Amino acid sequence: MYLRCMQIALVHVGPRPPSKDPFESLASMYLERCAAHARCQSESFRSEDALFDWVDRQQRRAPAIIVLLDSRGRQMTSENFAEWLGRQRDNGAQQIVFAIGPADGWSESSRKRATLLLSLGPFTLAHALARVVLAEQLYRAFTILTGHPYHSGH
């Protein structure tokens, strides 16, 4: 059973997308679908420091789980990602921050703060597209965990 006490934050370092941006609309749609399973939000930050200042200000019983998208990170299948997300939930994670970094990549100090470095694959993706892909994979992970037919395994 899902307790909506877990919060998912999909964040990025860079300019805030325009309100009528079609990629932002798609990412928001998937995050809204995830809302049945976790509280979800999307944020933009001007710098890595601003992102980590925000993370540090979040008041939780446990520190946030920080997942940085990084080309050198771990690649997972949708099923493996769902298993990872389910373990975090079952271990009482209160907040998971999925962060897409600056155009020139994450600094070494940011990489060291990460709980997980995650790669969406060998392609380089525009930030807006990476947000959509990640938001869809979060929704897919929740459907896998609940046995919803959205994910057919093909």
Image (cartoon, rainbow, N blue to C red):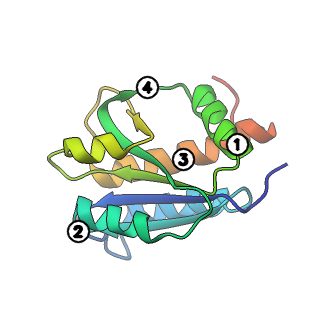
Q: Nearer the viewer, residue 120 or 73?
A: 73
Quadrant for the C terminus, please.
top right
Label drawn at residue 134: none
Q: Quick one: label 4, few (<14), some, or many (20+) residues within 10 Å?
A: some
Left or right, 143 with reference to 115: right
Name the front one of labels 2 and 1.
Answer: 1
User: Residue 75: which numbered mark, if any?
Assistant: 4
Left-right relation of 75 to 45:
right
- Name which of mark 4 and mark 2 comes first in the sequence: 2
Tell me if 36 is positioned left or right of 102 in this view.
right
Horizontal arrangement in the rendering, residue 122 relative to residue 35 (left or right): left
In the picture of the structure, the residue carrying the numbered disc 2 is 46
Q: Which residue is mark 3?
A: 136
First of labels 2, 1 by sequence position: 2
**Residue 106 seen in the figure:** no
| Cα–Cα gap, marks 2 and 3 | 24 Å
Amino acid carrying label 2: it is Arg
Q: Is residue 87 visible?
A: yes
Gap between marks 4 and 3, in whole Å?
A: 16 Å
Q: Earlier in the sequence, mark 1 or mark 3?
A: 1
Q: Residue at x 74, y 61 (%)?
A: 4
Foreground disc of the pair 2, 3: 2
